[in-house]
Image (spheres, helix red, strand yellow):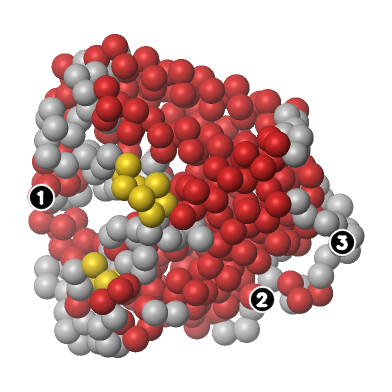
Amino acid sequence: MMKQKFTIGYKLYLAFIFCLPFISLGLPVGKFKFSIPDFLILLSFLSAFEKGEVLITTQFKRVANIILFFLFAVSLSVYKVSDISRYFMGLLPLLNGVLIVFLTFNYYYLYKENFLYYTKLAFMLALVICFLPAYPVFLGIKIDFFIKGYRYAYVMENPNQCMAYIFCGIVCVGILELIHLKKFSSLFFYLILFSIIPMLATGSRTGLFSFMIFLSFFFLINFRKTGVVFIAGGALGLIVLAFANLSKPNLNNNFFLNRGLSIFSFFETSKGDITQAGATGESIKLGLEAFEDNPFIGVGLGNFVGNYFVYEVHNTFVSILAETGIIGFSSYLLLLAVILVCIVRVDIPIKFKIFLYIAFALFLMMNIPHLLLRQRWTWVLFSFFYLLMFYQKKIKHVRNIWIN
């Protein structure tokens, strides 16, 4: 790996990756917050633009056309808005997402292997620091700064955001590992193991369910590692335990585990009908009604809240349908289709493809009970999936600390 002198713009991008979970710290802007990572990514772009580092690659043009079409499609919903300020507040996270994708491609093109190494390092450090406070919290030591209600949230607005960040962060590091090393390093295995307690401490039902599946498949397809068969068996055992305690899950009175396992009670009592799940279900029902009233361009971006319900739609797909209609929803499906094409076309061993397919499928599943499109790490995840189109089988020299 050749040493390169990094520009201020890329250093700010690395700082953005490192500070990605610090979204509860910032300046309020309407119902949202201009957080530390938002500030850093904007400065990174301004620096790159001022220094003439803005490069439009062929690969980025392919993605940019789809992203710009997506922005155009969702912006058409302005015709139906009743509150223009809410519309712009709904548009801001999407514009931020476009900026993230552009800068990811831009700095990868400038720094190639160094980008993969240092970006991965920044993500790993951010995740480890995020994990540390979860352990005493899980053991019953209350640390108010990192807790929302009774659940672990680090410095995010709520525990479910923490859950989504951990999952997306793990997948992002895995993708960078595959592009960089053509395999998973030992450090990546340890990072996954280290993430189990923080994920459980969020008490997220979606997180526990998706992470059990993710862990089981991940370790099974990498069974050659020492002890992973036992770890995979333990994860599968937890799944069996969960299904054996569908009605009244009770694991040593652990609040976080019991809350997470309550998803299986929901499956048993509701037969998997998400629209029966309290406020989440009510928001989805009303979102579908809003879509039926305005099927083509929706009720307007950001205009579901206040007009139809006190809360947002807790479902990414229904939210897009309700607020931007079939036009906006179809354009979002194109964004996802590009990711699928990248996975299909990348020339890697089948077990690594399985990892990518499972990660992508679980991300889609997590979109069913949560609104994830406006989250910064969702767009980082999209960016790294899109980077798969740069994958090359031939590997050059890489730093030894990342090799098994």
Whether pointer 1 and pointer 2 mark residues with C-beta atoms closer than 8 Å, the reply is no
- Dot 3, crowdedness within 10 Å: few (<14), some or many (≥20)? few
At x 12%, y 39%, the residue is 310
The dot on residue 278 is 1
Q: Nearer the viewer, mark 3 or mark 2?
A: 3
Helix, strand or loop status at disc 1: helix
Q: Earlier in the sequence, mark 1 or mark 2?
A: 2
Q: Earlier in the sequence, mark 3 or mark 2?
A: 3
* Disc 2 residue type (three-letter): Ser
Q: Earlier in the sequence, mark 1 or mark 3?
A: 3
* Disc 3 residue type (three-letter): Lys
| Residue 385 in view | no
Q: CA distance from mark 1 to mark 3?
A: 54 Å
Q: CA distance from mark 1 to mark 2?
A: 42 Å
Say left or right for 227 vs 179: left
> Residue 165: where, in percent of width, then height?
43, 58
The dot on residue 186 is 2
Taking depth in this image into account, of 357 and 95 the one nearest to the observer is 95
At x 27%, y 22%, the residue is 84
- Residue 349 picture quarter: bottom right
